[in-house]
Each structure stands twice: as structure tokens, then as C-alpha cells.
Image (spheres, grey):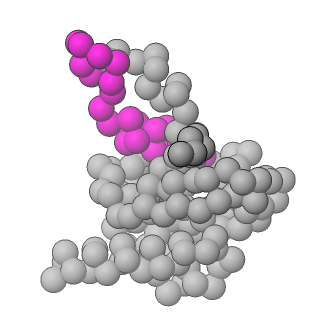
Amino acid sequence: MSVPKKELHRVVPAVIIYNSEGKFLIVKRSSRLKIFPGKWHVPGGGLSMDDYMNLPSSSPKQKQWYYVIERALRREVREEVGLEIGKPTYLLDVAFILPNGVPVIVLTYYAKYASGKFKSSEESVEMAWVSASEAKKYDLIEGIAGEIEMVDAILKAKKS
């Protein structure tokens, strides 16, 4: 019997942010980035152990932490675009392999814009508030336009 390979995954929470006008925030990645340079996407980024290891444990008996993904997502949005969001709602997950062979699990949420003014960063150099149909005109990372359409449909169904 063969021993299974140890598989390490990069976990990336991402969020589709919408505003009260029914528009969605997309941001353009810097052309200097190695992965998806110059592509448009939604805010998010990698989960790191720093997102929980130095926080008090949620359990007195063992080291475990609740709401790690939400905290990391809020941190990434703040760092990447300077905004605050409402309560994130889970949408979907997707797995893919980076060109360097690293497997990635993206956990996508959606949340209402709460406050703040966009600020560019080393990662995100431009932003746009777009409708679901307008999003298709941008050079988005594959799949993002469809995810925005899903959220648009969810939000429209809640209104009716």
C-alpha cells in the first residue's frame, strides 16, 4: 500500500461587495503581480496562521478559533481596498492549481458595502462599481463574472 502524498492547500477567502444601487466592486490587480497580473477580480487574499494563532482560543480545552475566515476576509478587504463590509454570506467554493503547482481553495462570500473610501494598494490599482452585465466587459479572472451574476440573482430574489 502506498502512503498518500501530503497535500497543502492555500486557502483564499474572497468577497463580492455590493452597494445599495445594485453595483458590485471589482478591482484591477497590479501588473507587477505574478498571479493574474492586470486582471480584474473581487477583493480577497490568502489566509495565514497570523489570522488566528495570536488570538485567544475559542475553546478552553484545545487550540481552536471561530470565525477565522470572516476575520481574514475583513482584514484583506481593509488592506487591499480600504473598505469595510457588512456580514459576509457564503456563496461557493472553487479549487484550482496555480501555475507553480500550488493547489488553491477559494471560499467566496458576498457582503454589502458598509463604509470607507477606495484606496489603491500594491495589489489593487484600480476599482469600479459595475452591474452584473457591465462586469462582463472587464478582463476578469475566469469565473468571477458568473459569481457576480449569482449574487445579483440572489439579491434580486430577496427584493421580490
Where is residue 142 shown, x and y percent of the image?
A: 61, 74
Instruction: Give left or right: position of 74 versus 9.
Output: left
Where is residue 76 shown, x and y percent of the image?
A: 53, 42
Which residue corresponds to the image point at 39% horizontal and 49% vertical from the top-left? 85
Where is residue 66 shown, x and y percent of the image?
A: 30, 32
Instruction: Give left or right: position of 55 versus 134.
Output: left
Residue extending furthest toward the left: 160
Whether residue 74 is in magenta: the answer is yes
Q: Would you identify the image quadrant in which residue 56 lies?
A: top left
Which residue corresponds to the image point at 32% horizontal and 36% vertical from the top-left? 67
155 vs 54: above or below: below
Whether residue 77 is in magenta: the answer is yes
Which residue corresponds to the image point at 48% horizontal and 63% vertical from the top-left? 94
Instruction: Give left or right: position of 105 versus 62.
Output: right
Q: Would you identify the image quadrant in which residue 2 lies?
A: top right
Q: Which residues are magenta?
A: 58-83
Which residue corresponds to the image point at 69% horizontal and 58% vertical from the top-left? 98
On the question of residue 44 being in view, the answer is no
